[in-house]
Amino acid sequence: MRRKKYLHIAVIGNIASGKTTASKILADAFKAEIVLEPFIDNPFLPDFINDKKRWAFVTELYFLRDRLKQHENVKNLLLKNNVIVDSGMLMSTWVYSKNQFKEGYLSDNEWQFYLDLHKELKKSYINENLVIYIKACPDLSLKRIRKRGRDFEKGYDLTYLNQLFTQLEELKEKLKEEETPLLEFDTGVYDLTDLKNQKGLIRLAKKKLKEIKKQCINIQPKN
């Protein structure tokens, strides 16, 4: 008997873009397990805050290790259910860590070492069936951050949100070049507090997955 293949969907987006809300909506719609972005107690963060260039490399390696542990959990969950991942390794590497490099906190050699390690880890990685980019302009993200008033987010400013937005846009282009199935949903236009927009997100995701399945069938070799 053929084993059922379950869906692996990653949801990416800026801070306060609505990606966690979207993840929960999709998890409910697809009857999926949800793996939320962890609040990691990284022991190197206090040192990093005081001296970013000195501590950025080991800080990012620690986060990468925890993302790998997170993905091992994802692989186990995929044996029996659909899985929605909030952020995951895509965000960790190509948004947060890459931004550290772009801002000069990681040297060329450190960034190359990080990428080499990431490449090795990817060998045991289960690729996403679909990546959903929850988009929001940095001004809107900052407005939402201030409205929800979380203490640990007080240090986020427009400059940092713009940096992450730039990396997300570059990641979007990278995924397109790699022909990774991608759906973009702008919460600045379609606010996910509106039930109609929630249904719209679900409908678009189902449509995209149907298109992907059809393409896969069409490229199957003939017997």
Image (cartoon, grey):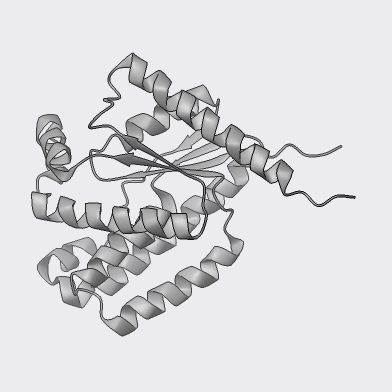
Lateral position of residue 30 relative to residue 85, left or right: right
User: Residue 178, image x and y in percent?
Assistant: 50, 60
Q: Is residue 157 visible?
A: no
Q: Quadrant of residue 49?
A: bottom left
Q: Is residue 186 above or below residue 67?
A: above
Q: Quadrant of the N terminus?
A: top right
Lateral position of residue 10 relative to residue 109, left or right: right
User: Residue 164, image x and y in percent?
Assistant: 23, 54
Who is closer to the viewer here, 26 or 69? Answer: 26
Who is closer to the viewer here, 205 or 39? Answer: 205
User: Residue 144, image x and y in percent?
Assistant: 15, 33
Lateral position of residue 34 relative to residue 138, left or right: right
Q: Is residue 34 above or below residue 71?
A: above
For the point 54% across and 38% down, which residue is it? 83
User: Residue 174, image x and y in percent?
Assistant: 41, 60
Q: Quadrant of residue 98?
A: bottom left
For the point 54% across and 46% down, which residue is it? 74
Q: Quadrant of residue 124?
A: bottom right
- Find the residue positioned furthest to the right: 223
- Find the residue positioned furthest to the top: 195
Q: Is residue 39 above or below residue 21?
A: below
Q: How many marks?
A: 0
